[in-house]
Image (cartoon, grey):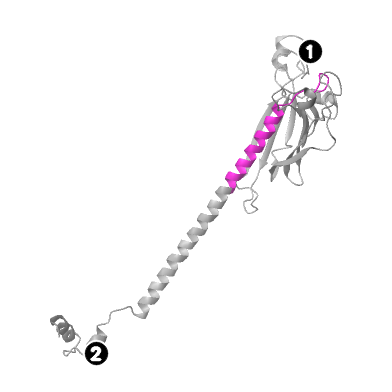
């Protein structure tokens, strides 16, 4: 036996270094130690899995918020861009054909201006559906018939040429998606009426006639877009506001009313 084996054998009470000393020399965990280690490992793993679950949920919520904000901002940008492109299809037809709390119909020119008016002016409809909670865009392409100087101007088909959803899971921010404002009445060329007339702050609530719609000088858009994930609820909802001034409105007129020249 080697000296170290002899010392170990004497310490174990087996100076001959037989099978008993070799059996006693085997090192390892006892059952209580093994159970304790397993319990601690399970607790650590459960904590790690719990943390991972929270991180995954928060990551999903963050992604949903980003997607909601992106869709909402793109929809608002599309709405305002098109409303700013509105034109009068003829000298006697206003740029706004219809207006309500949840819909606006207008004529727009998004071309480079090279083609004739009867070929390039489009009729567009922006509609909010309270039941579906969507904002849709309908485009009516011109038929190529009409004139730019006398009624009826460019003509359009009865059915939309294309329709697409701009935003879903949308709610009005306040009373309605669209609100309309007119200039304060100015009847005399005085500095007082000029100051009050040059700002379209009079809200129009009745828009049933062409004369009512002809007064519209500013359109306000306001809505709240929410995540498509039902578990998000109101978390991550984004409120969006913008406004568009009618292109034919002249704020320098002391008694301003949008006119088609």
Which region is colored magenta? 64-93
The answer to whether residue 101 shows anywhere in this view is no
Question: In the image, residue 88 lies at what x, y percent?
Answer: 78, 22
| Magenta-drawn stretch contains 194 | no
Name the disc covering residue 187, or none. Answer: 1
Q: In what quadrant of the picture does the N terminus appear?
A: bottom left
State the predominant SS element of the stretch in magenta.
helix
Q: Which residue is mark 2?
A: 20
**Residue sitting at 49 percent across and 61 percent down?**
50
Q: Nearer the viewer, mark 2 or mark 1?
A: 2
123 vs 65, left or right, is right
- As helix, strand or loop, the secondary structure at mark 1 comes to loop
Q: Nearer the viewer, residue 122 or 91?
A: 122
Q: Nearer the viewer, residue 33 or 98?
A: 98
Question: In the image, residue 2 lies at what x, y percent?
Answer: 14, 83
- As helix, strand or loop, the secondary structure at mark 2 comes to helix
39 vs 205, left or right, is left
Question: In the image, residue 190 lies at what x, y percent?
Answer: 73, 9
For the residues labelled 2 and 1, the Cα–Cα distance comes to 119 Å
In the rendered image of this protein, does residue 35 appear above or below residue 22?
Answer: above
Which of marks 1 and 2 precedes in the sequence?
2
200 vs 17, left or right, is right
Q: Residues within 10 Å of mark 1 (few under 14, many from 20)?
A: few
């Amino acid at each position: 036996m080697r000296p170290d084996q002899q010392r170990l054998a004497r310490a174990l009470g087996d100076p001959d270094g037989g099978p008993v000393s070799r059996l006693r020399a085997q090192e390892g965990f006892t059952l209580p130690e093994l159970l304790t280690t397993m319990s601690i490992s399970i607790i650590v793993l459960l904590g790690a899995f719990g943390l991972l679950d929270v991180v995954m949920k928060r990551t999903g919520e963050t992604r949903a918020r980003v997607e909601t904000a992106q869709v909402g901002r793109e929809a608002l940008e599309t709405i305002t861009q098109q409303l700013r492109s509105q034109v009068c299809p003829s000298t006697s037809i206003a740029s706004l054909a219809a207006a309500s709390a949840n819909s606006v119909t207008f004529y727009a020119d998004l071309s480079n201006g090279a083609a004739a008016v009867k070929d390039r002016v489009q009729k567009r409809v922006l509609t909010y559906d309270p039941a579906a909670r969507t904002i849709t865009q309908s485009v009516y392409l011109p038929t190529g018939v009409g004139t730019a100087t006398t009624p009826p101007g460019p003509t359009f088909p009865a059915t939309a040429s294309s329709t697409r959803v701009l935003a879903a899971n949308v709610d009005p921010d306040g009373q309605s998606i669209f609100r309309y404002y007119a200039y304060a009445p100015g009847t005399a060329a005085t500095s007082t009426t000029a100051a009050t007339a040059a700002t379209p702050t009079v809200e129009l609530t009745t828009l049933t006639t062409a004369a009512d719609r002809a007064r519209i000088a500013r359109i306000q858009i306001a809505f709240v877009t929410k995540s498509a994930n039902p578990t998000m609820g109101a978390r991550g909802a984004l409120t969006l506001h913008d406004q568009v001034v009618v292109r034919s409105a002249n704020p320098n007129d002391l008694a301003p009313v949008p006119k088609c020249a």
